[in-house]
Image (spheres, rainbow, N blue to C red):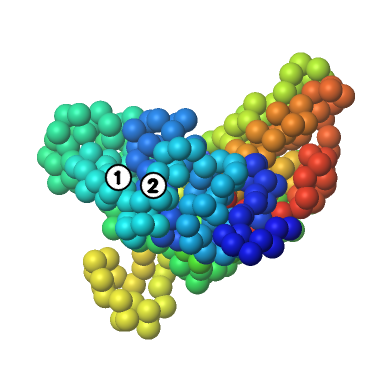
Amino acid sequence: EQQGVEAPVFSAASYACQRSTPQPGHNTLLTDSLAVLAESAELNGDEGRAVAFRRSEALLRSLDRRVQGVAELRGLPCLGEHSRRVIQDVLDNGKSSEVEETKSSSRYKAMKVLTGIFGVGVKTAKRWFTEGICSLAQLETSGHTLNPAQQAGLKYYADLNQPVTRDEADAISVTVEEAVCSVLPGAQVTLAGGFRRGKTSGHDVDFLITHPDEGKEEGLVHKVTACLESRGVLLYHQTTRNTYQESPEGAGRPRSNMDRFERCFSILKLVQDPVQVEADQTDSGCRPWRAVRVDLVVSPISQFAFALLGWTGSKLFEREMRRWAVHEKSMSLSSHALYDNNQKRYLTASSEEEIFAHLGLEYVSPSGRNA
Ligand code: DCP
Ligand code: MG
């Protein structure tokens, strides 16, 4: 370790999955700025640029103290010329002119509002923006036909754009666990996503469901949604069935695709604590409940470790793990399995620790995966 007299230099591994990245980190002014540029690139559909900014952001978040000057960042991976320019600007002026311009641009603002509607992706929002639609009011009078997801998204817009707190996630967990265990005793419900990484708020609540007897979990999503519906807490849902089939040995690697589990995108009704409601009588009016986005994912127990790793995130951490697997180990990692391209076989695992070990990576606990 360097212990120079002047300007101690940071060091960091190049893949995010080789580092522990806490939330929020010691450089929030810098990481928030880079996140705006990453988001703006995502909203432009510029994936390459977005990932580059996300990598810079994650690298800075992983540093164990505050950056005082760019000289300390000498030799660090993941920081391209553009990111370094933004960092320099923030360190010198307290903010980046590019970030400020981005945030105040009408395109960025409109795209944020429109993609903030559940069910509206970048492509749709872009099309609407090109037609001059910049606000919810303009969308409502535009005459566009919205699909059921988008209709629900519009209806619960204010609620769904208010971050879910940890307490609210815990309350939703109780509802989901009760429903799952009433339709399939012995089933296990695990809170995944950002909350498993220790985040204190999130845009939704993600649950992974399995059962110790392989096969018992089949068709579970429909039973759970029926139960939630009978209890009057299901405001919207869309389920997809499991389409994962392990390819025969040697037939190639599993596609890294998140959407092949039995899954339900839903909006649940969270009945709130009366005290809480009185405390914040904000724009959701005075009704004693709020809408919350909830994702339910069902995994067979044999794939559970992979599903848990995949659904814990962060998105960049997952992406980096898959990149590490391919480029450094000639393996293919998905939320279903790990395939070794040299040995031409699947490597099994019953815990996340085993998956890291197969990949030759030091274990990173969920709270360190906030890349
Ligand atoms: N995930 C993924 N790729 C997708 C969708 C999800 O890798 N296309 C994984 C990684 C995410 C996790 O699932 O961390 C949950 O997805 P979310 O979008 O809910 O992300 P987070 O829970 O991390 O963040 P938030 O706090 O915004 O909900
Ligand atoms: Mg989430």
Q: Extreme top residue here? A: 251
Q: Which mark is residue 1?
A: none
x and y percentages locating residue 239 in the rendered image: 51, 40
Q: In which quarter of the image is the N terminus?
A: bottom right
SS of the residue under disc 2 = helix
Question: What residue is drawn where x is 60% and y is 38%?
Answer: 319
Could you give the CA–CA distance between mark 2 and mark 1, rounded to whole angstroms? 8 Å
Query: Along the polypeptide, which appears first: circle 2 or circle 1?
Result: 2
Q: Which residue position is annotated with label 2?
A: 86
- Camera-nearest residue between 118 and 343: 343
Q: Mark 1 points at which residue?
A: 98
Could you say whether the residue bearing mark 1 is in a helix, strand or loop? helix
Work out whether residue 77 can be spotted.
Answer: yes
The answer to whether the residue bearing label 2 lies less than 8 angstroms from the nearest atom of ligand 1 is: no
Residue furthest to the front: 5
Residue found 55% across the figure and 50% down from its top: 73
User: Would residue 296 be seen by someone viewing this image from the given angle?
Assistant: no
Q: Residue at x 63, y 39 (%)?
A: 320
Give the amino acid at mark 1.
Glu
Does 116 sit left or right of 224 as displayed? left
Q: Total of numbered circles in the picture?
A: 2
Q: Is residue 221 left or right of residue 144?
A: right
Q: Which residue is drawn at 56% across and 47% down?
A: 74
Where residue 173 sits: x, y (%)?
A: 56, 64
Q: In the image, what residue type sits under mark 2?
A: Val
Task: Please tell me which residue lies in front, 236 or 9.
Answer: 9
Local crowd size for mark 2, using a 10 Å CA cut-off: few (<14), some (14–19), many (≥20):
many
C-beta proximity under 8 Å, tags 2 and 1: yes
Q: Which of 33 and 107 is in front in this view?
A: 33
Percent position of residue 50, x then y: 44, 37
Q: Where is residue 189 in the image (x, y as percent from the top left)?
A: 66, 57
